[in-house]
């Protein structure tokens, strides 16, 4: 027997969940198939566990407060690590439960099992007990996400050699860790491990940390890391790893030999396309194994769409937007048909780094005539009270003072950039910000300082031009 749906999503991560809930809202019979847990990477090995780990580590080791009060109250590691592990797993459980409830509340059928396509385009779901179920739908969304990329020359069977999934099951806090990859995930783990007292070395092939963020934010983070004593070896990666005594011997591509107890690979993700039967239905992949889609998130096969990490690693927010859009196109739902033009992203390091809109480099590439306004978070009333600093940077066009980018490094940068993101979306200018009343004491007050700084620079550059 075959169950007929309007929409089937394979994978209940952010992309699959948002797509099926939207379709169901508009009256389309929808199902989401999941082989593991509701919520995808967010609730299993990504956002929720890593951010809970970070929050708990900061709390237990009094990391931030120590610098302000000169007194650090740290719990003994053997007590703290057990509490942290339990806390992390209870947060993941809660979010999985909430996701499952949302799916049910939105009248989407949740089907537990592993899905694959049959040559005719139907979808077969197999559960752990060996049962099979046939489904068919007008539209199928592939939202199977991604997994950590594992380089072929490295054996992950050696104890202590981890990827971002297996590090969470390591069972002990590293004392000396080599992190391969200085992108957002590598930087997040670097701060967590530093807070937990580990000696941290980052190997990165590139020339700066977090290359997708504004370069000034990367430079601030690098400066902080070096001040804390973290080692960063740019232009390098791990060429080989072998067990040595109780630890590991890592040969870096620069020729340096390192002796950590743990190595974490946080460089790259592979799309989850294996075993889906994509060849049978004619879904094309690119040379890196990612599904190819057009602007409407249509694959090369009729009626089959794809969204989220399976197209290339992204963020939960973007995966949700892509899922939503795919379904708008699939069912001609009269909803906004473009991905949010003001992408926002955050790195939950300590301090956080976040941005929305254009970076300086992007403005230069587009040959935009722009100016920048900056504010030191330490000089805001909230920053002074908390004893914490950071930088808020606003990028605006000289011609009409329109805000086009906001970037922040600081305590709650991921929250702070939301104000700038909204100003950008609404076409606001530096005057909008300068004339807005802001709560005080808040970090957000930095917007006013940054707006006045930017306007001052603009006026002085205009004066110079006219002299
Ligand atoms: C360590 C880490 C930290 C991160 N932190 C953040 C963050 O702070 N903020 C942020 O926005 N993003 C973060 N991300 C990125 C974010 O998690 C992903 O971009 C997002 O989860 C992608 O959503 P998705 O729906 O495409 O895929 P996923 O969330 O990966 O979900 C895919 C689902 O499909 C299921 N599946 C796969 N194959 C099948 C099959 N054949 N049948 C049935 N089910 C299947 C999988 O089990 C999985 O549950 C982080 C990622 C990592 C790795």
Image (tube, rainbow, N blue to C red):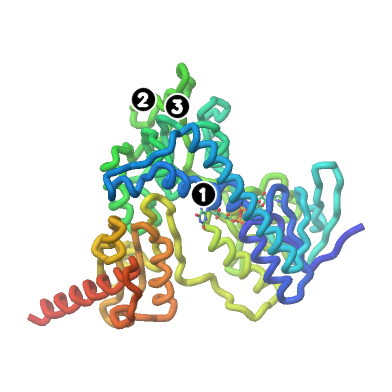
| Residue found at x 50% / y 37% | 81
Residue 334 image offset from top left, x and y in percent: 65, 81
The residue beneath circle 2 is 257
- Do labels 2 and 3 touch, CB within 8 Å? no
| Residue found at x 79% / y 64% | 137
Q: Could one spot residue 150 in this view of the protein?
A: no
Please identify the quadrant where the N terminus is shown. bottom right
Residue 261 is tagged as: 3
Q: Earlier in the sequence, mark 1 or mark 2?
A: 1
Residue 350 is tagged as: none
Residue 144 image offset from top left, x and y in percent: 66, 53
What is the CA distance from the residue labelled 2 to the residue labelled 3?
13 Å
The reply, left or right, for residue 126 in relation to residue 179 is right
The reply, left or right, for residue 1 in relation to residue 361 is right
Residue 120 image offset from top left, x and y in percent: 82, 57
Dot 2 alpha-carbon crowd within 10 angstroms: few under 14, some 14 to 19, many 20 or more: some
Dot 3 alpha-carbon crowd within 10 angstroms: few under 14, some 14 to 19, many 20 or more: many
């Amino acid at each position: 027997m075959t169950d007929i749906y309007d929409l089937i999503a394979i994978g209940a991560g952010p992309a699959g969940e948002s797509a099926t809930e939207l379709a169901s809202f508009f009256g389309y019979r929808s199902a989401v198939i999941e082989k593991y847990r509701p919520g995808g990477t967010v609730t299993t090995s990504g956002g929720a566990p890593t951010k809970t780990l970070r929050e708990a580590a900061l709390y237990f080791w009094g990391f931030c407060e120590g610098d302000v009060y000169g007194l650090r109250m740290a719990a003994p590691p053997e007590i703290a690590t057990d509490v942290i592990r339990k806390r992390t797993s209870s947060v993941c459980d809660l979010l999985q439960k909430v996701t499952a409830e949302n799916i049910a509340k939105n009248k989407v059928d949740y089907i537990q099992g592993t899905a694959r396509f049959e040559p005719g385009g139907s979808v077969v779901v197999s559960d752990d007990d060996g049962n099979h179920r046939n489904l068919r739908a007008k539209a199928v969304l592939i939202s199977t996400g991604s997994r950590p990329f594992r380089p072929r020359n490295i054996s992950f069977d050696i104890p202590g050699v981890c990827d971002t999934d297996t590090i969470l099951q390591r069972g002990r806090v590293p004392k000396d860790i080599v992190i391969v990859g200085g992108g957002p995930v590598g930087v997040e783990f670097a701060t967590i491990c530093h807070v937990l007292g580990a000696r941290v070395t980052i190997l990165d092939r590139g020339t700066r940390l977090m290359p997708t963020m504004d370069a000034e934010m990367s430079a601030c983070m690098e400066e902080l890391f070096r001040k804390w004593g973290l080692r960063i070896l740019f232009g390098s990666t791990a060429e080989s790893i072998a067990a040595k005594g109780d630890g590991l011997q890592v040969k870096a591509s620069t020729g340096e030999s390192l002796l950590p107890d743990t190595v974490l690979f946080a460089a790259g993700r592979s799309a989850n396309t294996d075993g889906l039967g994509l060849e049978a239905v004619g879904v094309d992949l690119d040379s890196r194994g990612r599904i190819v889609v057009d602007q409407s998130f249509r694959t090369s096969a009729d009626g089959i769409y794809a969204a989220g990490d399976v197209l290339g690693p992204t963020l939960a927010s973007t995966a949700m937007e892509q899922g939503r859009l795919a379904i708008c196109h699939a069912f001609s739902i009269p909803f906004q048909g473009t991905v949010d033009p003001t992408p926002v992203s955050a790195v939950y390091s300590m301090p956080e780094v976040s941005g929305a809109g254009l970076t300086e480099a992007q403005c230069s590439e587009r040959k935009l005539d722009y100016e920048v306004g900056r504010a030191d978070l330490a000089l805001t009333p909230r920053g002074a009270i908390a004893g914490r600093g950071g930088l808020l940077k606003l990028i605006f066009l000289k011609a009409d003072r329109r805000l086009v980018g906001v970037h922040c490094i600081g305590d709650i940068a991921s929250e702070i950039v939301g104000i700038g993101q909204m100003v950008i979306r609404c076409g606001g200018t530096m005057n909008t910000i300068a004339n807005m009343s802001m709560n005080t004491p808040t970090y957000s007050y930095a917007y006013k300082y940054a707006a006045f700084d930017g306007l001052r620079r603009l006026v002085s550059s205009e004066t110079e031009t006219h002299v």
